[in-house]
Image (spheres, grey):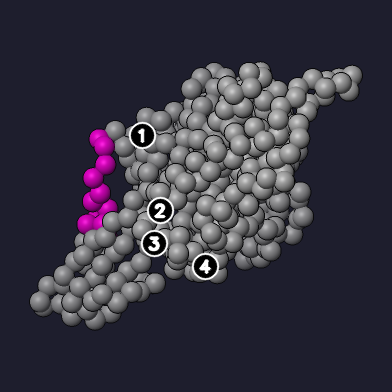
Amino acid sequence: MARRTKIHVGLEIGTSKTCIVVGEVKPDGAVKILGIGVTKSAGVRKGEISDFPQARACLKDALARAEDSSDVEIGSVFLSVTGAHMQGVNNRGIFRLPNNHEAIEFEHLEEAREMARDVHYPADHASLHTIVRRYLVDGLEQTASPIGLFAKTVEVDFHIVHGISNRIQNSIKLVRECPLEVDDIVFAPIATAQMALDREQRLRGALLIDIGGGTTDYALYLDGSIAASGCIPVGGDHVTNDIHLVTGLPFSKAEKLKILEGNASSDPALSVGIAKLTDENGFADVEVKRAILNEIIRQRLEETLLLVKERLPLGAVESIGAGIYLTGGTSLMRGFSELAFDVFGRDIYRPETPENSDLAHPSFKDPQFATAIGLIRYAQIIETETQRPPGFFGKILRLFWPFGR
């Protein structure tokens, strides 16, 4: 029987924008973007819902735009979530085989898995992802399931992402009231990495930094597996607010000045003269010393990157061979790549258009859409998997919506 195309929808409810991407996965694995619906977010603060009615109205607007642009009636989505409450930790479980067993059996591996899942986190948290990093058989690393191998001990190394369950439930509730079904829930940087990083880059070591309006998400990959992930509640809006506080400009003008005239580079040659905004008649409406403007921008963004660096495992930066990949709207700031190089001392890149896409959609190259497009990739991967470890998503939907909508 010939394989059919499959349509997946990715939804990102961010601080600055609410974005829905509709993608078609073709039989050969190519992904075609059919449409995108974007609207300015309201009721979302630092990646989390702060005003439910406003956030719902924005989501309905983005949904209508996505359906119009794609000519697809959307019934379900893959949803990304973020926020400072989300945490990624690594944990290992070790099981010693009984004396009368020479080879690893399924039950032995499950014992090691259970030990690896046994991570202490707050009572109000729940596990969202349990990702196998590696298996070890008598201390020797294995990339595939070790069932059937002769051994004395088997180890499972997990990366576990957990967060406050009530906040994740509120995101699910928002989606279901549109009304839409939730196919799965994905921690935002893990979704973004599906678009931004290929297998070779993960093997060589790569750090993804997705800096948006209210949050900075990151995911570190070493030796092909995820080594760290998290969210810092700082983004481009904080830069704008700093400009507002120092200059006294209204927030809207501070944002415009940042985008049109700002530069995060430490190059003194780029901080000479006066940064100006003109009014509707072409006259100078705002004038700020460029040195002051750029210093405000650089200091806040440098602080944010240093916070990411501090959260990485010891020696991780030195192990990054492929480089650092920047996504998110704030990564478009002039001079940001140079600043990131100054902080990390590694090559800085932005994701390229995926090779297995048959559509040169302009949004593929826009880092603002990296997470939503990454959700399509994530959906494609999940669809091909035969088994998935139990996680937070299934438990939440069974517990709180056992009877559907």
Residue denoted by label 2:
312
As drawn, 51 above or below 167: above
As drawn, 273 above or below 283: below
Q: Are marks 4 and 3 in contact (CB under 8 Å)?
A: no
As drawn, 306 above or below 152: above
Tell me the crowding category of disc 2: few under 14, some 14 to 19, or many 20 or more residues within 10 angstroms, Cα based.
some
Residue denoted by label 3:
315
Q: Is 115 situated left or right of 200 in this image?
A: left
Residue denoted by label 1:
165
* Rendered location of residue 196, percent (x, y): 59, 56
- Disc 3 on helix, strand or loop? loop
Q: Sequence order check: which comes first, mark 2 or mark 1?
A: 1
**Residue 357 got which mark?**
none
Q: Sequence order check: which comes first, mark 2 or mark 4?
A: 2
Q: Which residue is found at the position 47% from the left and 46% from the top?
A: 306
Q: Bounds of the magenta span? A: 113-123
